[in-house]
Amino acid sequence: MMDKIISKREQVSMTPDSVLEDLLEGNRRFVQNNLDTRDQISLKNSATDGQYPKAIILSCVDSRVPVETIFDQSIGDIFVSRVAGNFVNTDILGSMEYACKVAGSKLVFVLGHEKCGAVSSACDHVELGNITSMLKNIKPAIENTSTEGERSSKNAEFVQAVVEKNVQLNIERIRKESPILKDLEDFGEIEIVGGVYSLATGKIKML
């Protein structure tokens, strides 16, 4: 049973590859309904003096994608940044830079998911309050996705293709707009990766 959060010494010993494999193994446990057992009170108490998470995950706000749960992670394990459509902006890039450069995380993971409402709304050119401005961040993925059939949410294959393209373009944005993170990746100190979560199976497909 897990009863202590990750220590600094443990975090330092991790590699980007080992962290990625740990997260994917956690996802396999989630799919198999075989989650690790944890003493949440002890974990909470052990976290009061500091934190040394192994990764930062950028996810959509969708309530069907509980990030810690689908990776079988707990208190102190990962940073999670969430916004509808899982896109990066200045604030999220700053959070990623803090996680990796300051707090020592080894992995940046951009996580999309199937049947994303934000992506579907962007495909349909929805305009509503601040949602209008938010959805503009997904437009590049739409513009860079070619597929047969209707280019709207009525076309499930198109929406899924945009979901995947959105993850890929945001990985590119991270490297382009954060010299700090790109340097860390170039020197092998972190990896920047992406994947898509299946609502139906619970599996994460790496892109």
Image: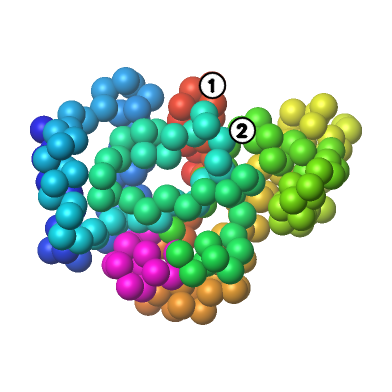
Q: Position of residue 1 (x, y in %)?
A: 11, 33
Residue 159 quadrant = top right
Residue highlighted by disc 1: 200
The residue segment tinted magenta is 96-107
Cβ atoms under marks 1 and 2 closer than 8 Å: yes
Residue occupying the far right of the picture: 150
Residue 155 visible in the snapshot = yes
Q: Position of residue 83 (x, y in %)?
A: 58, 49
| Front position in the image: 15 or 81 | 81
Q: Is residue 62 left or right of residue 203?
A: right
Q: Is residue 41 placed above or below 138 in the rendered structure?
A: above
Residue 179's disc is none
Q: Amino acid at mark 2?
A: Glu
Q: Position of residue 133 (x, y in %)?
A: 76, 55
Q: Residue at x 38, y 24 (%)?
A: 31
Q: Position of residue 143 (x, y in %)?
A: 82, 53
Residue 136 quadrant = bottom right
Q: Residue at x 32, y 20 (%)?
A: 33
Is the residue marked by circle 2 packed among few (<14), some (14-19), or many (20+) residues within 10 Å?
some
Residue 161 visible in the snapshot = no
Q: Amino acid at mark 1?
A: Ala
Residue highlighted by disc 2: 114
Q: Residue at x 18, y 35 (%)?
A: 40
| Front position in the image: 2 or 168 | 2
Q: Is residue 199 placed above or below 191 in the rendered structure?
A: above
What sort of colour scheme is used for the picture?
A: rainbow
Q: Is residue 122 left or right of residue 92?
A: right
Q: CA distance from mark 1 to mark 2?
A: 9 Å
